[in-house]
Structures are given as structure tokens and as C-alpha cells.
């Protein structure tokens, strides 16, 4: 059997030839192929489920959106049933629902880059007056 070469540097004919040779070697038991199992898709998230998860985590829509790296408007539209989360967002929602401590730990490690609650911009605390 020929040496395995980088497919990017082979002509189309050479790629087909090498593939056929590898197929024959596999059928003879001379070559084992690696089998990779893909993870199952994340479960769908209903509007009520998203609201429930967010409230369970005691997060505002803005904080929940920042946690998922999406806009607060997008979270609102999910919760109102106007839009459905994309697959990547569904996976993050699944992880947060199953392992909320992970999110807490990541947010604690990242530190507070901007205030989540507290006084509004431009207003001074009452004690400073």
C-alpha cells in the first residue's frame, strides 16, 4: 500500500486512487478506521423554559444575554416566542441549565468588566452631594 500523503497536495486522480487503496486495505483488515460519535443535538428551548431558567438563575434579561453573548433584544424575542435560539445558543442554554455552577465560576473568573446593577451613569450617589 502507498504511503498516506496530505490530500491537499494530491491531484484529484491521486486522491481517488489513494482513497480506493485505503478502502481495499481496510476491507482486508490491514487498516483500521477511527469511528467518531457525534454528540446529539441540544434539546429545543421553549419560551417558558428560557424564562424559567433565567429566573432560576436570578438573572435579568440583560445579564442572561451577556452570559450567552447575545443581545438583550434577542433574549426578549426568545421569551416572547418571536424567535428560536440558534443551535449554538441552544447548546449554551443546555449547559447552563444542567451545570449552572460552571457559568457562575466562569463569570467569577472573568471578573466584573462593567456594572450589572447599581447607580445609573451620570448620577452621583446621594452621600456625595
Image (cartoon, rainbow, N blue to C red):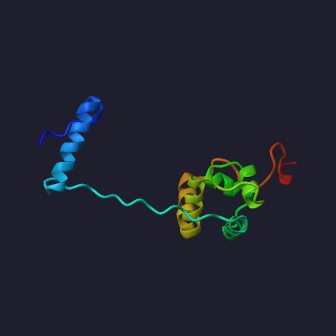
Q: Tell whether 43 sits left or right of 119.
A: left
**Residue 16 quadrant:** top left
Q: Nearer the viewer, residue 32 or 72?
A: 32
**Residue 107 quadrant:** bottom right
Q: Tell whether 106 sits left or right of 116.
A: left
Residue 105 shows in this picture: yes
Which x, y percent locates residue 4?
19, 40
Residue 117 shows in this picture: no
**Residue 31 sits above or below residue 55 on the image:** above
The number of discs equals 0
Residue at (70, 67) in percent of width and height: 58
Q: Nearer the viewer, residue 5 or 49?
A: 5
Q: Tell whether 124 sits left or right of 102.
A: right
Which x, y percent locates residue 67?
62, 55
Which x, y percent locates residue 98?
55, 69
**Residue 108 sits above or below residue 8 on the image:** below
Q: Tell whether 105 sits left or right of 66.
A: left
Which x, y percent locates residue 59?
70, 62
Residue at (67, 58) in percent of width and height: 64
Residue at (57, 64) in percent of width and height: 94
Q: Nearer the viewer, residue 70 or 125?
A: 70
Quadrant holding the N terminus: top left
Amino acid at each position: 500500500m502507498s504511503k498516506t500523503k496530505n490530500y491537499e497536495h494530491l491531484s484529484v486522480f491521486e486522491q481517488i486512487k489513494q482513497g480506493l487503496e485505503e478502502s481495499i486495505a481496510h476491507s482486508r483488515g490491514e487498516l483500521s478506521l477511527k469511528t467518531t460519535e457525534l454528540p446529539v443535538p441540544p434539546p429545543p428551548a421553549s419560551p417558558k423554559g428560557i424564562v424559567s431558567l433565567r429566573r432560576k438563575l436570578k438573572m435579568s434579561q440583560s445579564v442572561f444575554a451577556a452570559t450567552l453573548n447575545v443581545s438583550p433584544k434577542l433574549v426578549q424575542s426568545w421569551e416572547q416566542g418571536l424567535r428560536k435560539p440558534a443551535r449554538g445558543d441552544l447548546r449554551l442554554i443546555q449547559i447552563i441549565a444542567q451545570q449552572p455552577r460552571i457559568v457562575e465560576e466562569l463569570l467569577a473568573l472573568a471578573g466584573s468588566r462593567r456594572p450589572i446593577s447599581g447607580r445609573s451613569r451620570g448620577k452621583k450617589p446621594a452621600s456625595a452631594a
